[in-house]
């Protein structure tokens, strides 16, 4: 089975002390996190930073100590593939969100509860819950 590997992050900022998460909406209408395919000679972190910038226009700082993964199968051209996604936790401040119009319907800043409710996939809810729990301990 062919495996596709992507890297990204749960990106957040703090507005008046409240954590707000950067949630993207794909062209297909799904809500999730900025991420993209690992390219040759890139580390997972380099891929995440590049993809976050390409999709959102943000320069972020990766938060040490958090990393989670998701694996799921999907169909592409009639063949089953495995998607392996590595997620980090990243923070930004004082920057404007700029959606990559060729890939996204939009970018939104959401609190934890709103973000969880927006997700269509349980894996996205799990990733955000893990990241949110990690932030509570910091």
Image (spheres, grey):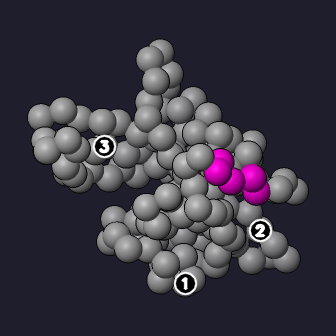
- Lower sequence index among marks 1 and 3: 3
Secondary structure beneath dot 1 equals helix
Q: Residue 73 location in percent, x, y?
A: 19, 51
Mark 3 residue crowding within 10 angstroms, few (<14) / some (14–19) / many (20+): some
Identify which residue is drawn at 36% across, 50% down.
Answer: 69
Q: Residue 58 location in percent, x, y?
A: 74, 47
Identify which residue is drawn at 46% across, 24% down.
Answer: 39
Secondary structure beneath dot 3 equals strand
Is the C-beta separation of discs 2 and 3 under 8 Å?
A: no
Drawn side of residue 14 relative to residue 109, left or right: right
100 in magenta: yes
Drawn side of residue 114 relative to residue 7, left or right: right
82 in magenta: no
- Between 81 and 127, which is closer to the camera in this rendering? 81
Secondary structure beneath dot 2 equals strand
Residue 84: image tag: 3
Mark 2 residue crowding within 10 angstroms, few (<14) / some (14–19) / many (20+): few
On screen, residue 77 above or below 132: above
Tell me the residue that label 1 is attached to: 113
Drawn side of residue 63 relative to residue 66, left or right: right
Q: Residue 115 location in percent, x, y?
A: 54, 76
Find the distance from the CA under tag 1 to the CA under tag 3.
Answer: 26 Å
The part of the chain drawn in magenta is 97-101
């Amino acid at each position: 089975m062919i495996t596709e590997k992507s890297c990204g992050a749960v990106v957040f900022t703090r507005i008046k002390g409240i954590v707000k998460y950067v949630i993207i909406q794909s062209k297909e209408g799904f809500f999730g996190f900025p991420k993209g395919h690992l390219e040759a000679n890139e580390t997972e972190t380099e891929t995440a930073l590049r993809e976050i910038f390409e999709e959102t226009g943000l320069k972020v700082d990766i938060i040490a100590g958090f990393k989670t993964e998701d694996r799921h199968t999907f169909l592409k051209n009639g063949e089953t593939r495995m998607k392996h996604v590595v997620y980090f936790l990243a923070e930004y401040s004082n920057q404007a969100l700029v959606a990559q119009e060729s890939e996204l319907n939009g970018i939104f800043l959401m609190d934890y509860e709103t973000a969880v409710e927006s997700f269509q996939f349980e894996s996205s809810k799990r990733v955000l819950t893990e990241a949110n729990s990690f932030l509570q301990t910091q």
